[in-house]
Amino acid sequence: MHPILRHHATRLAAAALLAVGATSASAQVGLVQLQAGTLPVAVSYPTAAAGTPQAFGPITLQVAPDAPPLPGPHRLVVMSHGTGGSWISDHDLAATLVRAGFVVAQPLHQGDNFRDVRQAGPESWVTRPQEVVQAIDLLAAHPAWQGRLRLDKVGVHGMSAGGGTALVMAGAQWRTLDLVQHCLAHGDADLGYCYNGLPDAAAQAPRRAQFERVRGVPALFLPKEIQVLQGGRTPAAAGGDPRPDARVASVSASVPVAAMFTSESLARIRVPVGVVSAGRDTMLMPAFHAARVLRD
């Protein structure tokens, strides 16, 4: 994979996204809420209007709601939040990118957000990249935005589950079988990933039993659905493009969920990738997630 950069603070993830290019040096932060069908998308953008304190639940942000955007064209970055998150938790990084001249779109991932986590995990991992594409398509067709954006080189950033989404947009692929095999081999060392939300041995027992059903079983006898590659495209020929959307030109992943990706697909990635690693992370052990992206 080339080039891969290691950073140690979330804000520095912006450095990888600079590969897509910015158009203005300094700006205020505008904010508008859009809908891609049923998918909410928060769009932050450069504006000359001064921001004012705006309350979003218990959080106050300095933004200019619905203010006129600065003339474009601007580059776009799509940001994918973590499990149970929202666009608000990543606003500081979004605002940093906006002040550098980018437009930032942040979809609220359905079934895996602060209001609803019923699809968190593999079910959401399938739909999250589709929602990133929805956000890009929304702005590409939107009468107020289609003439203000250059969409030939889009950046994607994500944290945790959103980091996994970013890697998918770069071309990475995963299988439920790889998840299960990882947890059979390293479950006790990677508890936050393999048994997230299950605090003790009694709560973990049913999931451990599910994993054990796969141990030693030949692939021929395993359910086909857990062997299906999900995520990026499998190139038909050597040198083929593994990205699910060719508009994505650069990604960054902050403490990404990554143990489920195949090494082969990580090795095929050909766009710039930035990786933020937290050395003391106990939820997603770096050796099995961020560090393995760097290795592969």
Image (cartoon, grey):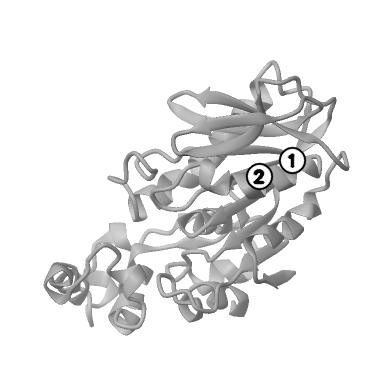
Front in this rendered view, residue 216 or 184: 184
Residue corresponding to mark 2:
94
**Is residue 252 visible from the viewing direction of this image?**
yes
Q: Quadrant of residue 23?
A: top right
Q: Quadrant of residue 184?
A: bottom left
- The one nearer the camera, 141 or 39, is 39
Residue type at tag 1: Val
* Residue 112 percent coordinates (x, y): 37, 45
Residue 49 position in % (x across, y down): 77, 24
The foreground one among 175 and 250 is 250
Residue for point 22% across, 80% down: 215
Q: Position of residue 69 (x, y in %)?
A: 77, 24
User: Do labels 2 and 1 touch, CB within 8 Å?
Assistant: yes
Relative vertical location of residue 6 with respect to residue 157 in this rendering, above or below: below
What SS does tag 2 mark? Answer: helix
Label at residue 98: 1
Q: Is residue 126 above or below residue 196?
A: above
Residue at 65% over, 50% down:
93
For the N terminus, which image quadrant? bottom right
